[in-house]
Image (cartoon, rainbow, N blue to C red):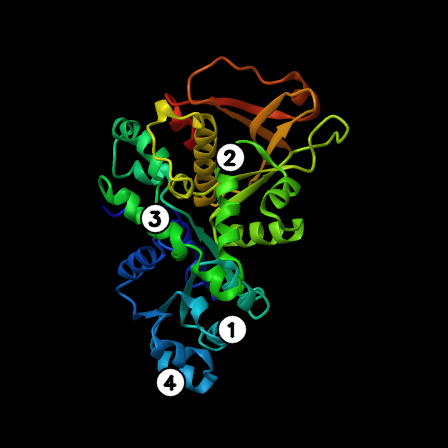
Amino acid sequence: MDYKRKIQENIEKYLFKKRVIIIYGARQTGKTTLVKSILKKFSHKKTLYLDGEDPANIENLSNSNLESLKNLYTEIELLVIDEAQKINNIGRTLKLFTDHLPQLQVIATGSSSFELSNKIIEPLTGRKFEFYLYPIALNETIAANSRAKINLKIDEYLLYGMYPEVLNTKGELKKKILQELTGSYLFKDIFVFENIKNPELLRKLLQLIALQIGSEVSLHELATNLGVDKKTIDRYLDLLEKAYVIFRLPALSKNSRKEIVKKKKIYFYDLGIRNTLIQNYNPLNLRIDIGGIWENFCIAERWKFLSNLDKDFKMYFWRNYAGQEIDLIEEKESFFNALEFKFKEKKIKLPKKIQENYQIKNFSLIHRKNWWKLLS
């Protein structure tokens, strides 16, 4: 099943504005399917798709001068360069396209942000629009399924995640696909471009994080458990964020004496990756980590929902030293939305202490029976 990706409409709004479109995302999230869908929609124009892993394309685009680029691409109106991070000097090439071939719209995709963005930030200053493609989002499944059908599949999403190929696969094959992803494939760019000397440390770090979802993470504790320094842990976490494996949620604090300030929570963009790292696909009714799983699921889905709609937002968690906490705080201009996540329905009130310091506009409790409130 092909899922209509929500960011496609946003991308199309920015086409032919004399800027390069950059689409970032982890491997296997559907970038190639997305750009080919865009090419199909604009088939009335002269289009061209180039695979950045093809040696011929690498040669043509790596060290090309302006004259050769004009000779090859003057007639093209919409050009896609898939896996563009594979191409040397891609930032310079994209700049030449933008500055000297005004009729040409270029879309470039990259499997991870760090290598591609390091190459393009300076050459493409003021010449690019950036988008991020994550695993399939709940609101993208609604177009192909009724709410009732999705309700029956939520438990499966919590166990096996939302990667396109996983969603389109049944039974034990889901585990096989996830095992391949969480082998070296998902982290291939980190190993290749960042010269990681200890891949096993990366895996052990992820496993520790996977066991702490929903809890505040201490860099000192992670470093101690793994026998390395805090700087190494922080660097690895940064790389994993840039590879779209995890994301960090900071603490919201205006009163540093009464509220948690320095600690962060770490979540996975996809729970299938998380559960595979710890090799736990047990049914949810047998899980002691169901609270953390549900919290991770809701925050990741909320992140994808807002990002796909190109919403301007900041996300935090909140906790004070008295033990009161809120799982997610969304900051929008001068007001805040508060969201709490519990797998089973409960009655929860917004803590008075947070109301004293922040203008909370909305407070929602999201549980297994009202998950669709994440999409509003």
Q: CA distance from mark 1 to mark 4?
A: 16 Å
Question: Seen from this angle, which residue lies furthest right?
Answer: 257
Q: CA distance from mark 4 to mark 3?
A: 45 Å
Nearest to the eye among marks 1 and 2: give it.
2
Q: Residue 65, can we see it?
A: yes
Q: Residue 376, can we see it?
A: no
Q: Which mark is residue 330?
A: none
Q: Residue at x 41, y 48 (%)?
A: 134
Q: Which mark is residue 95?
A: 1
Q: CA distance from mark 3 to mark 1?
A: 39 Å
Question: Seen from this angle, which residue lies furthest bottom?
Answer: 67
As drawn, 295 above or below 303? above
Q: Residues within 10 Å of mark 3 (few under 14, many from 20)?
A: some
Q: Which mark is residue 179?
A: 3
Mark 4, secondary structure of its residue = helix
Task: Residue 258: give x, y in percent of width and height.
Answer: 74, 25
- Residue underneath mark 4: 71
Q: Residue at x 45, y 43 (%)?
A: 269
- Residue underneath mark 2: 213
- Residue type highlighted by circle 4: Asn
